[in-house]
Image (cartoon, rainbow, N blue to C red):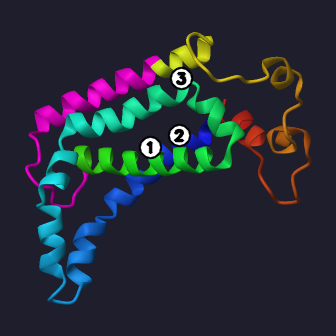
Amino acid sequence: MAQHLLLGMVGPLGLVLGAPVTLLLRTLPRPHAPKLGRLISSSPVHALTRPVVALILSSGGLVLLYLTPVNVLSTQRSWAHLLVHVHLVLAGALFAWVIAGPDPAPGRASVRTRLIVLGISVAIRASVGQLLYAGLLTRVHEPINEMRSRRPPDVLRWRHRRAAPGACSASHLTAHLT
């Protein structure tokens, strides 16, 4: 699930904030830049860049993934797993572009509308997260007993190791700060 979080929210936001359309418009040869401008202004792109459509594709995909058998299918079939990841990246990038993207978008909604849609998205994601945490209505089958019996990886047991000479450990710092 951490992978899905990174693919669906963190990665697309980084991609969108890099302003790839503006960069592409500035670097394309002169005859090709107007074609990209016409593509961005086309009616299919205009329909996709409405905040509600981006919300449905992004948060609706999340609900579909975790509250239906799609997640089980994606763990059993590699093509479904790849399709889920592609959807997470594309839907996340579209949502980030519509809500906070610096690139030009056809008929960009008002800030008020974008903030309302963002709030709805936060509520949907929080609700799905709570359902996952509670194990209610979800189709995610994690081996809870196995997860509880696992020892933490070596990386998490850093405080039991000796620090290199001259190195300062976090426990050493917190002991001096308190």
Counting residues from the N terminus, which is met first, the one under dot 3 or under dot 2? 2
Magenta span: predominant SS is helix
Does the magenta portion include 123?
A: yes
Residue 55 position by quadrant: top left
Q: Which residue is mark 2?
A: 5
Quarter of the image for the N terminus: give it.
top right
> Which label sits on residue 68?
3
User: Looking at the image, do the residues carrying marks 1 and 2 touch, with CB atoms under 8 Å apart?
Assistant: yes
CA neighbours of label 2 inside 10 A, class few (<14), some (14 to 19), many (20+): few
Residue pictured at 87% horizontal, 43% vertical: 154
CA neighbours of label 1 inside 10 A, class few (<14), some (14 to 19), many (20+): some
What is the C-alpha distance between the residues marked 1 and 3? 21 Å
Q: Is residue 110 left or right of residue 93?
A: left
Residue pictured at 27% horizontal, 74% vertical: 23
Q: Residue 157 at what x, y percent from top left? A: 85, 38
Look at the image and give the residue range highlighted in magenta: 101-127
Q: Which residue is mark 1?
A: 9
- Element at label 3: loop
